Amino acid sequence: MDTASVTLGEALAGLDRGDWSSEELVSDLLARIEAGNGALNAYLDVDADDALSQARAADRQRARGERAPLLGAPLAVKDNINVAGQSCACASRILEGYKAPCDATAIARLRREGAVFLGRTNMDEFAMGSSTEYSARGPARNPRNPDCVPGGSSGGSAAAVAAGMALAALGSDTGGSIRQPAAFCGCVGFKPSYGRVSRYGLTAFASSLDQIGSLTRGVDDATRLFFSMAGPDARDATTVTLPLPAPEACRREDLKGVVIGVPKEYFPSALAPDVRAAVLAAAETCRALGAETRDISLPHTEYAMAVYYIVAPAEASANLARFDGVRYGRRAAGATSPMDLYCRTRSEGFGREVKRRILLGAYVLSSGYYDAYYLSAQKARTLIRDDFTAAFRDCDAILAPVTPSAAFRMGEKTEDPVQMYLTDVFTATANLAGLCALSLPCAMNADGLPLAAQLIGPAFREDAVLGAAAALERAWGGPTGWMGRRA
């Protein structure tokens, strides 16, 4: 058995047939982590004994004839999602030593379905970054080329899946933090609609934008995890009670009768030629599968980055106020007063990028600037949402790039935060509008780096995205078929 290329679905089928046990699966993954994590830094913490204990318990259940949809399936978890008893430090010094007291709702639902939790994956501190270079535990690297970033903020999850150190992983997406690393590493990255998966137990970055999702080797695995996690939760008032889509609608074989919109604003002159070619080739495949492609316009896209980098830091500055050295996590030594304690703890505990965003957020919310910045951004956010509402009257899903280029080199953008922020230019709009979106690897460029296309669907129409992605993946020869395609 070689877990390097096995999908989650194939692993579960093998478990059902008795080809291997969950303990064997986990043991193989642990061996791969031990051999490869030193170079990639995809995992921050792995408790091998606990993972094997969970796997043996799953095997005993199976031996008794018990069954569950994910029984014995090992998953990796981003370091900002609570798993009871495990570290949840958000790759930050300020939460060193913190252990989660309970499971996040998404984790509890996966646990109920039999999942095994391998370990904690690296990330940009508090999910604030696009390259996983802003981790207090050191950067993660891209397994396709270790000189390149794996993307962020869920870069550790993407790297673990792409490197064969996880069958699938959980991530969070606030402005593209699942889809962008998936694109850079060659995984499927799926962000459900806002409100579809509970955020209870996810350490908040920007509460009106955050969403838990998955990074997987294939579309069917993303669908499987989506149905396992989705649904209303009394502990998260933003979750919706709308019915889930029909599972069969998420597993299409063709795109007959489907209209795919192609937004002109997502193909600027600065878009890398290989990314442009790969996405347009994906549009051609859509047509070959029976879809109609239609040029559309999302005219307020030009305001997306300004809106996102006002709204997200504003919410972050409020959410991160709780990390003060009083209740949990790091506490600075030698403080002479409560104010001195707060200042020392936060100065020592937060990294440069987190401090930058807290300051930005505090500024745009401050007296005299609230109306000019935060209120104006919320009005522009409404216009962006209205653009999508109008577009979906004429199309079922939207096809666009995920990123302006393939993975960039380590250190290339860390000294220029604006250039780093612009890597989210095609992904943040889906978060601002509360839509579902998916990154699908579709080709390799001349340097051997993955290229991806993004599918965006209406809110709560995950079937429109997953179904189209499933048809495209099948047309290209399955989950690894994209590797044989050149842009």
Image (spheres, grey):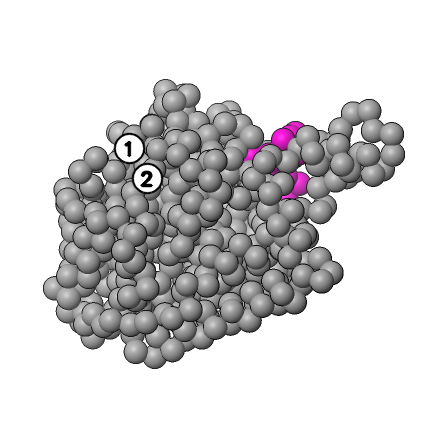
Q: Measure the alpha-carbon separation of dots 2 and 1.
A: 9 Å
Q: Quadrant of the N terminus?
A: top left
**Residue 413 percent across, percent down from the top left:** 42, 38
**Above-or-below relation of 244 to 406:** below
Residue that badge 1 annotates:
144
Q: Tag 1, which secondary structure?
A: loop
Q: Residue at x 69, y 34 (%)?
A: 347
Q: Nearer the viewer, residue 382 or 435?
A: 382
In the image, what residue type sits under mark 2?
Ala
Residue 407 numbered tag: 2
Q: Quadrant of residue 248?
A: bottom left
Q: Residues within 10 Å of mark 2 (few under 14, many from 20)?
A: many
Return the residue nearer the eye: 11 or 177: 177
Q: Inspect the image, locate mark 1, and give the three-letter code of the amino acid beneath it.
A: Arg
Mark sitting on residue 469: none
Q: Position of residue 187 (x, y in %)?
A: 32, 44
First in sequence: mark 2 vs mark 1: 1
CB within 8 Å, label 2 to label 1: yes
362 or 388: nearer the eye?
A: 362
State whether residue 106 appears in this view.
Answer: yes
Residue 202, given in percent of the width and then of the height, sits at 57, 48
Q: Residue furthest right?
A: 337
Q: What secondary structure predominates along the stretch shown in magenta? A: loop
Q: Residue at x 57, y 57 (%)?
A: 310
Crowd band around label 1 with a 10 angstrom C-alpha radius: few (<14), some (14–19), many (20+): many
Camera-side residue of 135 and 90: 135
- State the extent of the magenta-drawn residues as a range: 88-102
Horizontal and vertical percent position of residue 374 = 61, 63
